Image (cartoon, grey):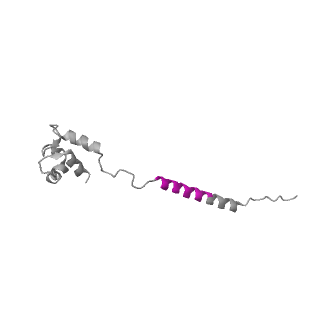
């Protein structure tokens, strides 16, 4: 009776190729993800758009005269606290322009 010899494939070479392929795929994927992230293109957090600011201003402008009195500004506690600072022309009212500048500062 003859003993058959089994040939074992060179599994070490196969394992090296598999590890190398996995490493290359991982690095390639990471590079692709990093390339898709454009720095500085996102809207900064807590920054309202001009449409948002205008809508909020109009809701607070109860008499629709295009300016906020101190009483109307009470809808915005942060505005009331800084009313004199925001009212840059010192007319005792806050215009939409003054309101927008304060919101974006």
Find residue 81 and report its horizontal and vertical position in percent. Answer: 16, 52
Residue furthest to the top in view is 63
> Which quadrant would the N terminus be assigned to in this image?
bottom right
Q: Which residue is drawn at 38% across and 51% down?
A: 42
Whether residue 12 sits left or right of residue 23 in the image: it is right
Q: Residue at x 49, y 55 (%)?
A: 35
Which residue is nearer to you in this view: 15 or 88? 88
Read off the magenta span.
21-36
Q: Based on the picture, tell me whether residue 1 belongs to the magenta stretch.
A: no
Residue farthest toward the front in the current orientation of the protein:
89
Percent coordinates x, y for residue 66 in the rendering: 17, 40
Magenta segment's dominant SS is helix
- Residue toward you, 5 or 83: 83
Dividing the picture into quadrants, the one containing residue 24 is bottom right
- 83 lies left or right of 14: left
Left or right of 4 in this view: 61: left
Residue shown at the point (29%, 42%) measured from the top left: 51
Quarter of the image with the C terminus is bottom left
Q: Magenta includes 26?
A: yes
- Where residue 94 appears, x then y in whole percent? 16, 47
Image height check: is 23 above or below 75?
A: below
From the top left corner, tell me how far across and down residue 22 is, in percent.
Answer: 60, 57
């Amino acid at each position: 009776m003859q003993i058959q010899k089994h040939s074992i494939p060179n599994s070490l070479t196969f394992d090296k190729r598999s590890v190398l392929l996995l490493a290359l795929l991982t690095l390639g994927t990471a590079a692709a993800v990093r390339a898709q992230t454009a720095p500085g293109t996102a809207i900064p957090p807590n920054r309202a758009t001009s449409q948002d600011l205008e809508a909020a201003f109009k809701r607070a402008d109860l008499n629709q005269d295009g300016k906020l009195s101190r009483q109307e500004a009470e809808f915005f506690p942060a505005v009331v606290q800084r009313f004199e600072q925001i009212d840059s022309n010192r007319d005792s009212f806050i215009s939409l322009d003054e309101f927008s500048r304060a919101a974006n500062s």
